Amino acid sequence: MPSDPSPDCALLMTRAYDALAAGEEAAAGVALAAAVAGWPHMAEARGAFGALLRRQGRPAEAADQFAAAATAEPDRAAWTLDQAACLLETGDVGGAWALVSVVLARRADDAAAQRLAARLQLLRGDREAALAHAREASFLAPHDLEGAAAVGQVLVEAGDPLGAVQMLEPLLAHAHPADPALAPALVLQGRAWAALAEGDRAARCWRRALEADPDDVGGAARLLAALEAATATGAGDDLTPTYVKALFDRYADRFDADLTGKLRYQAPQLLRQALEALGVGTGLDILDIGCGTGLGGVEVKPLARHLAGVDLSPRMVEHARARGLYDRLWDADLMGALAEAEGAWDLVLAADVLVYLGDLAPVFQAVALALRPGGLFAATVERWTGEGAYALRESRRYAHAQPHLLAAAAAAGVTVAHLAPAAPRWEKGRPVDGLLFILRKG
C-alpha cells in the first residue's frame, strides 16, 4: 500500500474531520478506519484514529494506532507519548514508563513528557522523582495553564500542595475567562488549598470554577458541598500532616529569627530547666520529635549519649542538620517515628509540637511504648480553659485542657512528674498561656 496520501485518502481524512466537527463519531470512525486500511503508514490517519478510539474509551486499540503512527513518524514524540498515555489507561504503568523514558532520553526538554513522567513515577512509588519531573515540566512550560493543572495534580498527590498553589496562582490571576483550562485548574487549586487546611480559599476557587463551567465537569459543586458539610460539623478542623509540612517548609529559612526574636520562643529552655530540676542525668538516648531547626537539640545535647531528631518538614531537617548536633535526623511524622523501636528512648522531647495535634491520647500511648522504664516525656502545650478537651484556635494551633492531658496520661499508663503553667512563646505582644509537663513511664 502507498505511504503517501492520495486524493482518495485526503478525501477520507476530510470526511473524518468534518464528521468529528459535527459530533458524528461513528461516521468519523468509518472514514478513519478506511484511511488506515488503505494507507497503513500514514501517521496522521493513525494518530487521528487513535485519538478517536481513546475518546471512545478504547485505550488498548488506541495505543496500537499511536504505535503505528510513531513507527511511521519516529521523530514526532507526541505519538509515543499518546501511546504511553493509553497504556497508562489500561493499567500498564511499566509499558508506559518505558516509552516515556525513551522520549526523555532524546528530548529532556519536552514538557509533555516530563508531565507524564511525573504521573508515572508517582504511580511507581517514587515520590521524589515524581516531584522532580513535575517541577521540570513547570519550568519548561510556565505559561501553559492546562499543563500546569496536570503538574499541580501530581504535586498535590505527592504531598506538595504549596508548590501547586505557587505555580497556579499567577496563571489563574491572568487567565482568560473563556479559557477551557480555567475551570479544571481552579478545581485543582481548590484541592491544593484544601490540603493546606485553607478552606475559605478552597471554596473561593470552587465557586470560580462553577462560574467558569456551569456544567461542572470537574465536580466543583460536590467538593464545595463536602467542604461546607465538614465545616458545619467541625470535621474539617483537623490540621493535616500535609498542611503542617507545607507550613514549615515555607517557614524554615526565617524560623529561628522569627521565633527567638519576634515571638520570644523559650520552650526548649523551659523544658531543659524543668528536666534539670527533676535531677535528670546525662548519657541519655533522646528523641526530639518535631525537632524543627534544632533549637530543642541545643538545650538537651549536654544530656545526650545519642540525640535523634525527626520532623515532618524536610526543609526544617536540613537546617537542624547544619547545626551538627544530632546523631540521627530524618523527616517523618511523629507517630511513625515513635513506632520505629519500642523501649528505645530515655527522653522524648516535644517543644511546641503538640499544638498541631488535637487528641493527644494516641500520642501519649505511642510515647509510652517508645520509652524505656523510667523514661521521660517532656513537652509544652497551649492551655485551653473553655469547653471540651481541646480546641483549634484562629492561629491554626490547638490548645489543650489540663484535664485532657491528665486523662491521656492515665490512659497511657504514665505518671505526671511535673506539670506547671508556662509561656512557651509570645503572640501579639503577650505571653501565650501554656502548660509544661513531664511524664514518667513506670
Image (tube, helix red, strand yellow):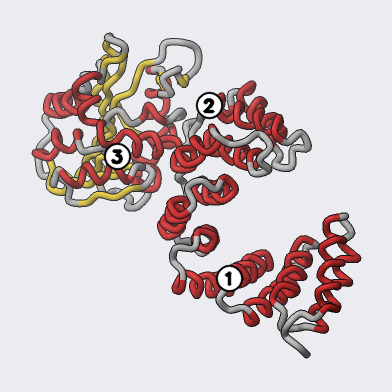
- Asked which quadrant contains residue 202, the reply is top right
Q: Which of 338 and 216 is in front in this view?
A: 216
- In the rendered view, would you say 81 is above or below 304? below
Q: Where is residue 351 in the image (x, y as percent from the top left)?
A: 27, 30
Which numbered disc, 3 or 1, marks the residue that appears first in the sequence? 1
Q: Where is residue 19 in the image (x, y as percent from the top left)?
A: 87, 61
Residues tagged 3 and 1 counted as in contact (Cβ below 8 A): no
Q: Where is residue 38 in the image (x, y as percent from the top left)?
A: 82, 84
Residue sitting at x 64%, y 32%:
206
Q: Element under label 3?
A: strand
Which numbered disc, 3 or 2, marks the residue that appears first in the sequence? 2
Q: Where is residue 188 in the image (x, y as percent from the top left)?
A: 59, 41
- The residue that disc 3 covers is 289
Mark 3 Cα-neighbour bin, 10 Å: few <14, some 14–19, many ≥20: many
- Asked which quadrant contains residue 399, the reply is top left
Mark 1 Cα-neighbour bin, 10 Å: few <14, some 14–19, many ≥20: many
Residues tagged 3 and 2 counted as in contact (Cβ below 8 A): no
Residue located farthest toward the bottom when viewing the structure as drawn? 1
- In the rendered view, would you say 28 is above or below 293? below
Numbered circle sitting on residue 212: none
In the figure, is residue 15 to the left or right of 164? right
Mark 2 Cα-neighbour bin, 10 Å: few <14, some 14–19, many ≥20: some
Residue sitting at x 87%, y 72%:
31
Numbered circle sitting on residue 96: 1
Numbered circle sitting on residue 237: 2
Q: What residue type is labelled 1?
A: Ala
Which is closer to the viewer, label 3 or label 2?
A: 2
Q: Element under label 1?
A: helix
Q: What residue type is labelled 3?
A: Ile
